[in-house]
Amino acid sequence: MSRIRGTAAKALDRLVLAHAHLDSYRKGRKNRELFDDVETYCTFIGYPRSGHSLIGSLLDAHPAVIIAHELDALKFVATGFRKYQLFQLLLDNSRRFARKGREWTGYTYGVPGQWQGRYDELRIIGDKKGGRSTLRLAENPDLLQRLQKTVATAVKFIHVVRNPYDNVVAMYKRPPQHVRVPSLGAIVEDYLSRCETNADLKERLGSDAVLDVRHESFVEDPRSSLRELCGFLDLGCDEDYLEACASVVFRSQHKSRYDVEWDGASLAAVHAGIRKFDFLEGYSYER
């Protein structure tokens, strides 16, 4: 039965891809001049349940930025979509998500009075699908070069991190589909595997192409964090934009680490990961 369901899902996915290919080809050719001023392709890498949705939504509110929500753009790159097809899919996704009020997993990420789903001068375009993008790049390292060739412009990566103990438990509560037996230990292993991939990507790409963003720092001071993000993307940002974005950021953070009983092996594995990966330095179970 599971094999039949798997075959049906693959067939449906092929139909969806075929429809997206035809629709984006037609619309992309018609609208290609909309994308002539794009300077940078922006994508997220990281981990599920780490705060990507908030940051992607706030960037999408900028008048020069379109960030799709959960499009999984690398899937389309891997199957041969062209630049203007990909950009059209990203724009359509952003518009749809804005029309729906940018609601996701019980949260609303709409920014009043700003530019979500639309733009004034489109200079940055990209996709918020951090956890899945990391998996795809791990499974197919050549996909990075293919992405760079497809978009034919600068590519920058936003790497969002969260306290690993909180991130692991959040993933444990809503486990990734590919983790067949989602025990706490298995989730820790999956999380650390993503850390390995992202550390390798950071080394390959260099500091100019990857920005680490700590979720806790972003929530604590969203204005400063957004200024840093905009600077990384070579964007200006006015005070109205910063104020509107900051107004929708929840100041309180739920420390998921306390929601489960940890075993010693899982605690030790996360602690070792914090010591190994420089982008996790300073995190601990206690704070």
Image: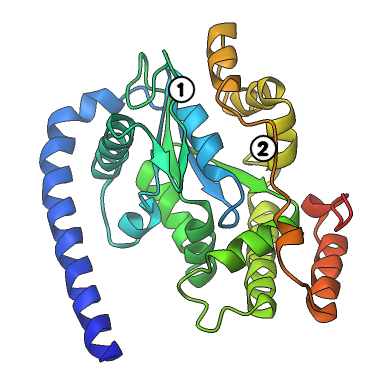
Amino acid type, callout 1? Val
Dot 2: element? loop
Which picture quadrant has residue 168? bottom right
Apparent side of residue 147 relative to residue 259 in the rendered image (left or right): left
Residue beneath the point at 54% across and 60% down: 134
163 is higher (above) or lower (below) than 121: below
Q: Bin the neighbour count of mark 2 within 10 Å (Cα to Cα): few under 14, some 14-19, many 20 and up.
A: few
Q: Bin the neighbour count of mark 1 within 10 Å (Cα to Cα): few under 14, some 14-19, many 20 and up.
A: many
| Residue 153 at x, y percent in the picture | 44, 36
Apparent side of residue 35 relative to residue 235 in the rendered image (left or right): left
- Assign the N terminus to one quadrant of the image: bottom left
Res. 6 visible in picture = yes
Dot 1: element? loop
| Residue 212 at x, y percent in the picture | 69, 42
Q: Earlier in the sequence, mark 2 or mark 1?
A: 1
Residue beneath the point at 39% across and 19% down: 115
Amino acid type, callout 2? Asp
46 is higher (above) or lower (below) than 31: below
Residue bearing the label numbered 2: 208
